Image (spheres, helix red, strand yellow):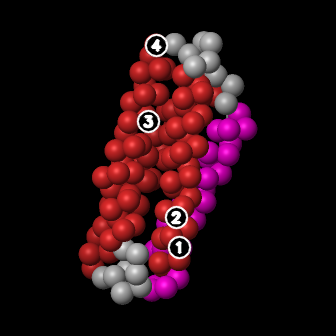
C-alpha cells in the first residue's frame, strides 16, 4: 500500500474508535468524543480532496478515474454539508446527547460512515494506489 492510503486507513480506524467511544459513554465524554470526531472527519475530507485533486493531475490518471474521483469529491462534500455538519451542530452539548433523537441520528451517521469507509477502502483507495498514493 501507498503511504497516503495507509494514512487514510489509519484515520478510518481512529473514526471507528471514536464512534465506539460515543456509543459507550455519556454526557460530557460523549460531547468530547463528538468534537474529536468532527475535527478528524473534517480534516480527513480536506486531505482526501487535496490528494484526489493531485491524483487527477498525474500522468496516467485516465478519464474513468477522473470522473469517479470528481464524483467521489462531490459526494463527500454533500455528505459533509447535508449530514455531518448539521449533526455536529445539533448535538454539541451534553444536554442533548442522551436523548432518543441523538440515538436515532447517531445510528444513521454511524451506519453511513461505515458504508463510506467500506467504499473508500474497497473501491476507491485501490485506484489511488495505482497512481502511487
Residue 19 in sight from this viewpoint: yes
* Cα–Cα span, label 4 and label 1: 40 Å
- Taking the image as shown, residue 57 lies to the left or right of residue 83, namely right
* Cα–Cα span, label 3 and label 2: 20 Å
- Disc 2: which residue: 37
Q: Whole-percent x and y of residue 70?
A: 43, 28
Highlighted range, magenta: 2-29
| Image vertical order of residue 131 relative to residue 95, above or below | above
* Cα–Cα span, label 3 and label 1: 26 Å
Q: Quadrant of the C terminus?
A: top right
Residue drawn 46% across and 74% down? 23
* Cα–Cα span, label 4 and label 2: 34 Å
Residue drawn 43% across and 34% down? 72
Marks 3 and 2 close (CB-CB < 8 Å): no
* Cα–Cα span, label 3 and label 4: 15 Å
Mark 2: which secondary structure?
helix
Marks 3 and 1 close (CB-CB < 8 Å): no
- Disc 3: which residue: 73
Upstream in the sequence, badge 4 or badge 2?
Answer: 2
Q: Whole-percent x and y of residue 5?
A: 64, 38
- Disc 1: which residue: 33
Upstream in the sequence, badge 3 or badge 4?
Answer: 4
- Taking the image as shown, residue 25 lies to the left or right of residue 93, namely right
- Taking the image as shown, residue 46 lies to the left or right of residue 131, namely left
Upstream in the sequence, badge 3 or badge 2?
Answer: 2
Mark 3: which secondary structure?
helix
Amino acid at each position: 500500500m501507498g503511504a497516503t492510503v495507509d494514512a487514510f486507513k489509519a484515520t478510518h480506524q481512529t473514526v471507528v474508535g471514536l464512534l465506539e467511544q460515543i456509543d459507550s459513554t455519556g454526557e460530557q465524554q460523549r460531547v468530547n468524543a463528538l468534537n474529536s470526531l468532527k475535527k478528524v472527519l473534517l480534516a480527513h475530507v480536506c486531505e482526501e480532496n487535496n490528494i484526489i485533486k493531485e491524483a487527477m493531475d498525474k500522468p496516467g490518471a485516465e478519464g474513468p478515474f477522473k470522473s469517479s474521483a470528481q464524483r467521489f469529491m462531490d459526494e463527500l462534500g454533500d455528505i459533509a454539508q447535508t449530514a455531518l455538519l448539521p449533526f455536529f451542530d445539533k448535538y454539541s452539548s451534553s444536554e442533548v446527547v442522551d436523548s432518543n433523537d441523538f440515538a436515532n441520528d447517531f445510528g444513521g451517521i454511524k451506519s453511513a460512515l461505515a458504508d463510506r469507509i467500506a467504499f473508500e477502502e474497497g473501491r476507491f483507495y485501490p485506484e489511488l494506489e495505482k497512481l502511487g498514493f
